[in-house]
Image (cartoon, coloured by chain):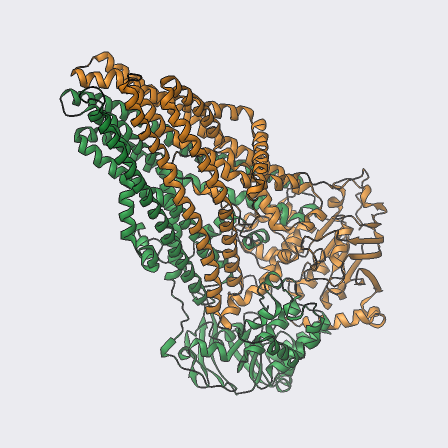
Chain colours: A green, B orange
């Protein structure tokens, strides 16, 4: 991913980028069920996952029936008054009209109330259901293995719990509501029409059927056109973004004019596709108006003819004309409603796709075992690992790490040392063989026990946008400030804490930006210390830090590893030198193991590595 | 409203106000909405914004409004047609049991004419309203982006990336959002006027009902918009919050997992999600109340008209047709009145968006250029800086977070980044710039390249003050490889050539020099392979080598590399640097370096600390004369034992690699 893309992914300010991410996320792991589900299946499964959608639905539907029935009050009143009020004994029958109007007004009030109740209940059910969907999807993402969560998918995974759900929400608040009301409206209007005259109802439907098909056809074209708009918009925002994220490069190479031309081109392409889509979207309006005109004409002509035969009254004919407006409105909005519905279903399907992704590393839960406390013994028994459809990265590895050992793991990139560590912390499971802690197969250990006894400090300490104290406390939320201070003191970091203006309350900024890389590592170490594990797994940071911090990190590491079993991926000579033992990886196998002094004396991979370290730092 | 679907205009004839009208999801930046107190201000300012649009695209606007008026007039006319048909076709036929061909033909002709008129009007109105909106958006997007190109780098540094991107996108979009319903609203005013005239001429007494109902409708509309608008912005802000939590939590997924904190994280997210839910339900409740009221008011009006109309009819004042006409008008007028609400709903965001766009467009401070040129000699540039000071005027981050121009990590000293730098580099020399984080190394490189101007002091190239040079002179003779590599979404060839007239052979030569020819030739498509978001993803080291090739393809006489090979394997880096020095027309090279191996390749080392040059000499000399340098280099030494990490494709994908990858792109953190 290029720099502007990443920066854009950081910001949720930008739906275009979000869209672009979605397009890029046609990912086999996340979309196993993409093609097999129909819209109806998606809906059913979605409702099953969020029971809030269906809670009290019958009552809501009852309100909906009354509310939509209210739509025909006026046409009925018009019909009744024209047919029965107009031709009283001598002129208009005022008594009848007054009764009629009073009853209708009362009914209108009732339908208003029902309409309100229906709306509120639908909004609440929809949003509650979506909140549940969000929560479940979010939790599920965290339950997925690191392999599934990999960084390329991060943006897409965020979209699953944000924009995808927002899309459903938008649909439910507007299109979905209208769809419900419009369908009801068509149904009620048709029913009333049929009561007046089935022949005329047939005429109306014959007029509107082509519109219905036309709308469906237009909607398909429209959704393609909108896709194009989104793509072009994404490209355009990418190029515009380059003027900001690439400001230095553009100036350094003096390519302002070229960049301006690129911007013009994408802006125009976007505008053109927007206008094209708009043309399709607009097309439905005159189409519907003409159909309505034809419909009205047919109603008047056929209605008069029926009236002459005594099958229809004047009031009924005029009521038909009023009812026609109930037909046109839904048709006019149909393309947009269907389009939104399609987006919402697609979004929903994507969210369900995440929930359908089975975590390949699962908590044994109730059936699992607890690990006893105390320094851990590690054993790898003939462990083999390869990434899905990838080459073997760890090949038949067997090793024992005795309790309390400080083990350094060395090897070149791709030698398998990172994989070794991931298997050790059960971020992944071996393809073959067994990893045991204190003799217990890791796959049988409950997550709660595993995570409290085995703690890993990743290369880059990730910090959350809150205070320093909160970030340390992340490892153990119940710890007090005093405990944190003690921990910092015990790790020899009291002077660092004292140097911070606000102590534990110091804000660390987004992703810890206000702290240096070295300070972020310190936080990660304190975090691990607070978690108080029995097996500590460290992935040594490679980024350069200033000498002061470097000394602090070394000191903290020294104390952190005391009395625990520790396994460190060593990138530095000094780390390997000071470890009790060194494991040397090469091409997926452990080729050497033993204390530094021993290994360095024998010819082999370690001696070569050592020689290259010495030469590069001499 | 999502970016891509913004083509849906809110005036699609419909019952409920579309979501865009109140919430337009275009920007997730929480923004303060003006309260009701400022509402009138917003209204008049919003009208001025819309006025600007009307003046910019007068013809399109005019035709759109004419379309809207046609539609409005025909709509009012359709009610009269219905009244006429009631009196002249329908009732006579039913009362007399017979009808004439003429009456039926008239009816058909009138109804079809009404349909044709409406169809024409609505097509004109909707198409041109959207055309105007899109044209204005495109116009301002271009203007903003071009402004970004013209403004100096120092201006860019004062503004966060996210803000600038949203100015060019969401703000432009928001500014012109009300253009979509604008012609309809103008048409609606017209419609109300002619409907009023039609009613008064038909029957003043019945018209009275309208004069009660429609003002109430309009007032209800305004009240609703005022109340729902702050709620909707709150929901929008919460949406951003939910997204922020998700982003952060997934970015820290490894930490969450390894510390077993999934439950607390889920709780944190659920809390945010529930607040969003509550806000949305609140908006929903408001709308639930409003929609039935808005729909029922005209219906009550119709009932009142029926009651009053029957009485008027009994006195012989009106015909049944008049009654039907007025009743029908009531059902037609409800929707147009709502278009005011849509505009009102969009206006606050429009005004805010417009103000932000304007503040970009009004930004000044473009660099001024001289007229002098440099000679095209085949030797390196003689580079000289004298008494250069530089400080960042104000950081957008506010207090506490000063960044060196491109270094990441906070610096300790506030204010001044460069404090009297004197530097003199002879043509063809290779100089390593060394110093702790925040020493001002990166800033110095940008001052040397005149990406920013020094506050005081001078920089000269071949003896010419950089400020006296023509605009294209510096890029023509020099090249900077910045710390954060930048890849355009384009082909490899275009990423190297950047529009210059360069043939493939030259491109390949540059790639060879940057040791990038190997992986490029393996890319699918070679030089034509697309890079960036939609194309091939390159590793950090590969990107850096590409950036280097981009710099050397221009055969610069001065090459400045700002820690430009940090992700490149040390051995490869050594070969690259050696290759640069072997060239016949040896360029002057300034390299900001962290690795001892890199430093040792330089002819000379310049040691900086806190914005000053403290020592200068060969590496060996400095080891004896400068304790600060010695300390730093020893610290690097320990770090430099790291293994090469320039694997073209990481063998072990996953979060363990993320940290490294994000290191490759300090662009995000440093800005």
Quadrant of image for the N terminus of chain A: bottom right
Query: Which of the 4 image quarters holds residue B9?
Result: top left
Residue B82 point in image, percent of width and height: 30, 21
Q: Position of residue A477 (x, y in %)?
A: 53, 73
Q: Is residue B9 visible?
A: no
Up-down: is A600 above or below B301? below
Asked if residue B485 can be seen in this view, the reply is: yes
- The C terminus of chain A sits in image quarter: bottom right
Asked if A314 appears above or below B347 in the picture, the reply is above
Relative placement, left or right, of A43 versus A429 is: left
Nearest the viewer among A455 and A326 is A326
Q: Residue at x 74, y 63 (%)?
A: B412
Name which residue lies at 42% across and 30% down.
Answer: B214
Q: Name the one closer to the observer, A582 or A216.
A: A216
x and y percentages locating residue B94 in the rendered image = 18, 19
Indicate the position of residue A73 as horizontal and vertical percent values.
27, 35
Residue at x-position 34% and y-position 27%: A289
Position of residue A600 relative to residue B140, above or below, is below
Count of numbered circles on the image:
0
A16 left or right of A322?
right
């Amino acid at each position: 991913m290029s720099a502007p893309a990443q920066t854009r992914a950081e910001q949720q300010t930008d739906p275009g980028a979000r869209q672009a991410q979605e397009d890029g996320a046609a990912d086999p792991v996340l979309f196993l069920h993409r093609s097999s589900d129909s819209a109806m299946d998606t809906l059913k499964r979605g409702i099953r996952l969020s029971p809030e959608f269906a809670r009290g639905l019958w009552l809501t539907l009852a309100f909906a029936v009354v509310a939509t029935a209210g739509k025909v009050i006026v046409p009925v009143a018009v019909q009744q008054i024209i047919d029965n009020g107009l031709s009283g004994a001598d002129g208009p029958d005022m008594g009848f009209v007054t009764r009629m109007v009073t009853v209708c007004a009362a009914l209108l009030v009732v339908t208003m109330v029902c309409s309100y109740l229906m709306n509120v209940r639908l909004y609440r059910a929809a949003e509650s259901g979506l909140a549940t969907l969000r929560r479940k999807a979010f939790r599920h993402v965290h339950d997925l293995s690191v392999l599934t969560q990999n960084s390329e998918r991060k943006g897409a995974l965020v979209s699953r719990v944000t924009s995808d759900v927002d899309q459903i929400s938008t649909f439910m608040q507007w299109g979905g509501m209208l769809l419900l009301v419009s369908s009801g409206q068509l149904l009620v209007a048709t029913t009333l029409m049929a009561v007046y005259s089935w022949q005329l109802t047939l005429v109306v439907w014959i007029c509107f059927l082509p519109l219905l098909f036309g709308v469906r056809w237009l909607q398909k074209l429209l959704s393609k056109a909108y896709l194009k708009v989104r793509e072009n918009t994404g490209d355009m925002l990418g190029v515009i973004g380059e003027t900001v994220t690439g400001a230095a490069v553009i100036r350094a190479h003096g390519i302002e004019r070229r960049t301006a031309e690129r911007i013009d081109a994408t802006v125009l392409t976007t505008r053109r596709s927007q206008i094209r889509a708009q043309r399709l979207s607009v097309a439905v309006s005159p189409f519907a108006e003409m159909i309505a005109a034809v419909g009205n004409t047919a109603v008047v002509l056929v209605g008069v003819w029926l009236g002459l035969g005594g099958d229809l009254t004047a009031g009924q004919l005029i009521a038909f004309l009023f009812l026609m407006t109930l037909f046109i409105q839904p048709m006019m909005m149909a393309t947009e409603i269907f389009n939104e519905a399609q987006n919402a279903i697609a979004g929903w399907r994507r969210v369900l796709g995440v929930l359908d992704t089975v975590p390949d590393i699962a908590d044994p839960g109730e059936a699992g075992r607890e690990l006893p406390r105390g320094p851990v013994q590690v054993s790898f028994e003939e462990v083999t690992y390869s990434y899905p459809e990838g080459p073997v990265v760890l090949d038949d590895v067997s090793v024992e790490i005795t309790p309390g050992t400080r083990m350094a793991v060395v090897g070149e990139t791709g030698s398998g040392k990172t994989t070794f560590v991931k298997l050790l912390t059960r971020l992944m499971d071996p393809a073959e063989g067994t990893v045991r802690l204190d003799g217990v197969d890791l796959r049988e250990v409950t997550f709660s026990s595993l995570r409290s006894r085995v703690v890993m400090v990743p290369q880059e300490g990730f910090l959350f946008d809150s205070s320093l104290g909160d970030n340390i406390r992340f490892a153990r939320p119940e710890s007090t400030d005093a405990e944190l201070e003690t921990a910092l003191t015990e790790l020899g970091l009291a002077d660092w804490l004292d140097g911070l203006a606000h102590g534990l309350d110091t804000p660390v900024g987004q992703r810890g930006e206000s702290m240096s890389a070295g300070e972020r590592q310190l936080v990660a170490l304190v975090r691990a210390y607070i978690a108080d594990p029995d097996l500590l797994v460290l992935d040594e940071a490679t980024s350069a830090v200033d000498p002061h911090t470097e000394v602090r990190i070394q000191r903290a590491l020294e104390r952190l590893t005391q009395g625990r079993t520790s396994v460190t991926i060593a990138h530095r000579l000094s780390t390997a030198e000071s470890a009790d033992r060194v494991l040397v990886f090469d091409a997926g196998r452990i080729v050497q193991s033993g204390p530094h002094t021993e290994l360095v004396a024998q010819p082999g991979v370690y001696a070569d590595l050592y020689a290259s370290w010495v030469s590069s730092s001499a | 409203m999502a970016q891509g679907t913004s083509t849906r205009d809110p005036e699609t004839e419909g019952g409920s106000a579309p979501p865009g009208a109140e919430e337009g999801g275009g920007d997730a930046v929480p923004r303060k909405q003006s309260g009701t107190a400022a509402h009138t201000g917003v209204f008049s300012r919003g009208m001025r914004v819309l006025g600007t649009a009307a003046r910019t695209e007068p013809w399109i606007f005019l035709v759109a409004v004419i379309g809207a008026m046609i539609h409005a007039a025909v709509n009012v006319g359709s009610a009269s047609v219905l009244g006429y048909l009631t009196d002249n076709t329908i009732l006579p036929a039913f009362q007399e049991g017979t009808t004439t061909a003429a009456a039926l033909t008239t009816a058909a002709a009138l109804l079809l004419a009404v349909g044709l008129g409406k169809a024409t009007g609505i097509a004109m109105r909707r198409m041109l309203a959207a055309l105007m909106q899109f044209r204005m958006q495109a116009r301002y997007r271009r203007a903003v982006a071009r402004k970004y190109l013209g403004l100096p780098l120092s201006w860019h540094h004062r503004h966060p990336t996210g803000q600038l991107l949203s100015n060019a996108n969401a703000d432009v979009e928001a500014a012109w959002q009300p253009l979509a319903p604008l012609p309809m609203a103008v048409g609606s005013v017209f419609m109300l006027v002619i409907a009023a005239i039609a009613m008064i001429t038909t029957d003043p007494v019945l018209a009275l009902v309208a004069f009660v109902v429609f003002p109430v409708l309009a007032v209800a509309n305004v009240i609703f918009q005022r109340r729902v608008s702050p709620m909707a912005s709150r929901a929008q802000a919460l949406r951003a919050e939910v997204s922020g939590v998700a982003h952060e939590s997934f970015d820290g997924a490894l930490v969450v997992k390894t510390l077993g904190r999934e439950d607390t994280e889920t709780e944190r997210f659920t809390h945010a999600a529930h607040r969003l839910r509550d806000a949305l339900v609140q908006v929903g409740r408001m709308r639930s109340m409003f929609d039935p009221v808005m729909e029922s008011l005209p219906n009550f009006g119709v009932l009142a008209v029926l009651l009053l109309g029957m009485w008027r009819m009994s006195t012989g004042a009106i015909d049944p047709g008049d009654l039907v006409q007025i009743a029908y008008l009531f059902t037609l007028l409800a929707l147009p009145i709502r278009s005011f609400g849509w505009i009102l709903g969009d206006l606050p965001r429009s005004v805010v968006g417009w103000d932000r766009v304007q503040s970009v467009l009004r930004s000044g401070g473009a660099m001024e250029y001289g007229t002098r040129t440099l000679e095209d000699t085949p030797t390196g540039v003689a580079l000289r800086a004298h008494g250069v000071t530089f400080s960042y005027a104000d950081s957008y981050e506010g207090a506490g977070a000063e960044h060196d121009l491109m270094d990441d990590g906070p610096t300790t000293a506030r204010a001044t980044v460069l404090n009297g730098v004197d530097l003199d580099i002879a043509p063809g020399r290779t100089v390593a710039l060394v110093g702790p984080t925040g020493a001002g190394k990166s800033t110095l490189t940008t001052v040397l390249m005149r990406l920013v101007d020094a506050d005081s002091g001078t920089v000269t190239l071949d003896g010419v003050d950089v400020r006296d040079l023509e605009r294209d002179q510096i890029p023509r003779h020099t090249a900077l490889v910045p710390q954060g590599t930048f890849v355009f979404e384009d082909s490899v060839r275009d990423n190297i050539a950047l529009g210059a007239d360069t043939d493939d052979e030259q491109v390949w030569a540059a790639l060879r020099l940057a040791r990038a020819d190997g992986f490029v030739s393996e890319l699918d498509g070679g030089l034509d392979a697309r890079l960036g978001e939609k194309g091939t993803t390159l590793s950090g080291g590969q990107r850096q080598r590409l950036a280097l090739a981009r710099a050397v393809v221009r055969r610069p006489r001065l090459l400045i590399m700002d820690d430009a090979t940090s992700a490149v394997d040390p051995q490869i880096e050594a070969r690259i640097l050696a290759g640069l020095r072997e060239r016949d027309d040896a360029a002057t090279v300034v390299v900001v370096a962290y690795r001892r191996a890199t430093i040792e390749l330089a002819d000379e080392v310049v040691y900086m600390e806190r914005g000053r040059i403290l020592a200068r000499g060969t590496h060996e000399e400095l080891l004896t004369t400068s304790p600060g340098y010695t300390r730093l280099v020893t610290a690097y030494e320990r770090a430099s034992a790291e293994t090469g990490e320039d694997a073209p494709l990481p063998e072990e994908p996953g979060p363990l690699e993320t940290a490294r990858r994000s290191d490759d792109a300090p662009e995000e953190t440093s800005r």
